[in-house]
Amino acid sequence: MPELPEVETVVRGLNGLIIDKKVVTVKCDNPKSFPNDQSQIDNFLIGAKVRRAKRRAKLIIIDLSTDYSLVVHLKMTGQLVYKGEQNWGAGHPNDSLIGQLPDKSTRVIIEFADQTKLYFNDQRKFGWMKLLPTVEVAELAFVKKLGPEPLADDFSLVVFKKRLARKQRSNIKAAILDQTVLAGIGNIYADESLFLAGVHPRTLVGELTDQQLKKLHQTIRQVLQKSIDLGGSSSRNYVDATGAKGNYLNWAFVYKRDQQPCRQCQTPIEKIRVAGRGTHFCPICQPESRS
DNA sequence: CACTTGACCTGTCCGC
DNA sequence: TGCGGACAGGTCAAGT
């Protein structure tokens, strides 16, 4: 669920909360969530100071003073939540969530020298964090294969078309979900951007018109930016680094809106399966191409 | 190689 | 109320 806008929101939050903090203890209840050896953790995480947090695709990368980085993938249910005086206390809106940590979904606890803590929670245990040398992050096989960042200035229509060139026979939804084509789109923003572009999710890439490609290139960027502005989407359990939920779904056109009226034409939104995933669309605004 | 399906997990919701 | 099963959806491995 955390897709590009949610991960970006977490990273921005971390940058305002944990810079220069020094790690003093690390606890992990589930080796799969944090598979490093204890000796690596002792040597390169304990005692390290946080330099900065950044994002690549859906990855959170926390650079440390030891020239190691903590790389985190939240997958579906991961949360990276900071508990400090800023966001925890009687009367604070996030107290009900933050105050209860750790809970049964807590996998890793990182404690800083000022006794504040960073919690990695992950109900379904699909997510992970890994400690590795900063220079090796970009060399990871799956990082090297990632497509371009859709919000980068140089992500032009020409680049978009080039990226789709080898996907002519797959449907457009599967193509934009493929992280080697584009980095950062997941199920929510795939559905939303296809709706705004008026493209049926099962349309084959090779059958898209130039006009549709141009429109989709724009709507992908629009939707991702809009969601970042709204703090992301909280479909199930996404929260940002301060424990706050995102607001995008109050504004969504199709995602999780099956049977509800389309915001443009009042036709009930339909839910189908495309690329193995629940897919929401408007049958009038996104007509199926006949072929 | 391109594309699809299944596995990884746990919690929730729906129908009987 | 309890219980089975479908579903949620990011990514990689395995299968077609």
Image (cartoon, coloured by chain):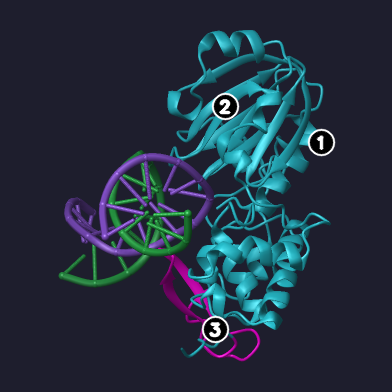
Chain colours: A cyan, B green, C purple
Give the structural element (helix, strand or loop) at label 3: loop
Q: Nearer the viewer, residue A52 or A174?
A: A174
Q: Secondary structure at mark 1?
A: helix
Q: Which mark is residue A130?
A: 2
Residue A252 colored magenta? no
The percent coordinates of residue A220 (x first, y second) are 69, 66
Q: Is A258 placed left or right of A144 in the picture?
A: left
Q: To which residue does mark 1 refer?
A: A16
Q: Main secondary structure of the magenta part?
A: loop
Q: Earlier in the sequence, mark 2 or mark 1?
A: 1
- Mark 1 residue type: Gly
Residue A139 visible in image:
yes
Q: Are marks 2 and 1 on the same chain?
A: yes
> Which residue shows up at 73% across the image and 76% down it?
A214
Counting residues from the start of the chain, the first of labels 2 and 3 encountered is 2
Name the disc covering residue A269, or none.
Answer: none
Camera-nearest residue between C7 and A97: C7
Does label 1 or label 3 sit earlier along the sequence? 1
Based on the displayed image, in which of its 4 quarters is residue A233 positioned?
Answer: bottom right
* In the image, residue A163 above or below residue B9: below
Looking at the rendering, the stretch of residues picked out in magenta corresponds to A258-285
Q: Residue at x 75, y 71 (%)?
A: A218
- The amino acid at mark 3 is Cys
User: In 3D space, how far apart are the residues under numbered discs 2 and 3 (Cα atoms)?
Assistant: 41 Å
Left or right of residue A48: residue A256: left
Whether the magenta-drawn stretch holds residue A262 is answered as yes
Q: Give the SS element for disc 2.
A: strand
Determine contact: label 2, label 3, CB under 8 Å: no
**Residue at image mark 3:** A282
Residue A174 position in % (x across, y down): 50, 64
* Label 2 crowd bin: few (<14), some (14–19), many (20+), radius 10 Å: some
Horizontal and vertical percent position of residue A124: 43, 42
